[in-house]
Image: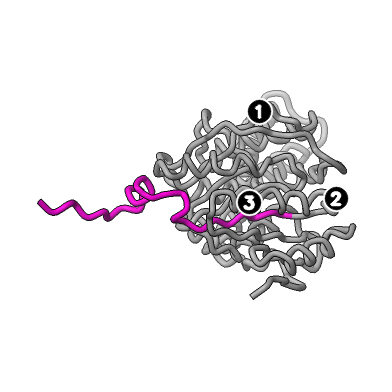
Amino acid sequence: MQSPTITSAVTQRQVANISDFRYSVVIPVFDAETTIAEVIRRTSAVFESRQCSYEIVCVNDGSSDDSWSVLREQARNNRNVVAIDLIKNYGQHPAMFCGLKHSTGDFVVTIDGDLQNPPEEIFKLVDKALEGYDLVFGQFKQKKHSFVRRLGSRVIGLLNEKIFGKPKDLKVTNYRLMSRSLVNRMCRYRTAFPYLNGLALKFSGPRLRANVMVEHCERQSGKSAYTPRRIAQLVLTILFNYSSYPLALVSVLGLTVSLLSFALGVFLICKRLLIGAMVPGWTSIVVIMSFFNGILTLLLGMLGEYVIRILNTVSDNSCYEIGEVCKVD
């Protein structure tokens, strides 16, 4: 009897060996001169020990220290390292988006360049992905982030639930693995303000996401680039580029003001007819101004709703500019 033909990618993954795939590790680098060489060394050792085909794509996001010199040297000495230098600092998510677009692996893993995401945990994500998942997030046993960073993560987590439909039991982190098909869908999305977790959730099926427990280490040097200001910028990016909540809020506010002004107008007219007014003409002026200001606010909200949808449709995807790429052919 002839054996059945394997047709689905999920089934193919389940019967394949880890070494049958090529892996890409994308690392955004910002002021990581003292740690990035060790991250690359340990990441290479993890894949070499399993005899897997791999590449490490490091994106220097306008570092103010000597990170680019370190990356360039690493790329010249290791043919599996691709070093990309952006012309200025664009932020973690545009840097990672750049790395995704330059990756070639069947699976793409994103980790930080500060050794808080141990490379030795990568194959925990891979093992889970081979069960048939397109998106696997590392769930930290114990976070080593500061209070401000944890608070910001909580706020962003709530936005992920409301805007991208993230299940409450799914823990979203920057230590993630994505399948090539998911990465391709994400990279086709045109945006000047990429948010990786949001795009990953947007373009993955609800049943193809999973968590796996991983370690989270203390920062080896320096301090987090996620200051309260950057966290606020990320929250605003999510709100204004991936949702219409602010505009909907303004529309509701305009409608509320219109209703209140109408009620106020009825009250003032009744008062004018029954009691009289101290200043002739005051009632009509206040009623007209209140009503039409409310209507204008409502109309601006509605127009803004259309504008944001048009911007999302025609948005340019030039969220970064590359100064130099260094790799061994």
**In terms of sequence position, does the residue under pointer 3 or pointer 1 come before the other?**
3
Report which residue position mark 2 lands on: 34
Residue 299 visible in image: no
Give the SS element for disc 1: helix
Give the residues in magenta: 1-28
Tell me if residue 135 comes above or below residue 269 in the rendering: below
Answer few, some or many: residues within 10 Å of disc 1's Cα (few below 14, many 20 plus, some between 14 and 19).
few
Residue visible at 52% across and 64% down in the picture: 188
Which image quarter is the C terminus in?
A: bottom right
Tag 2: residue type? Thr
Report which residue position mark 3 lands on: 195
* Separation of marks 3 and 1 at Cα, in angstroms: 49 Å
Tell me if residue 20 comes above or below residue 123 in the rendering: below
Residue 267 is marked as: 1
Residue visible at 68% across and 40% down in the picture: 118
Percent x, y of residue 82: 68, 65
Mark closer to the observer (2, 3): 2
Tag 1: residue type? Phe
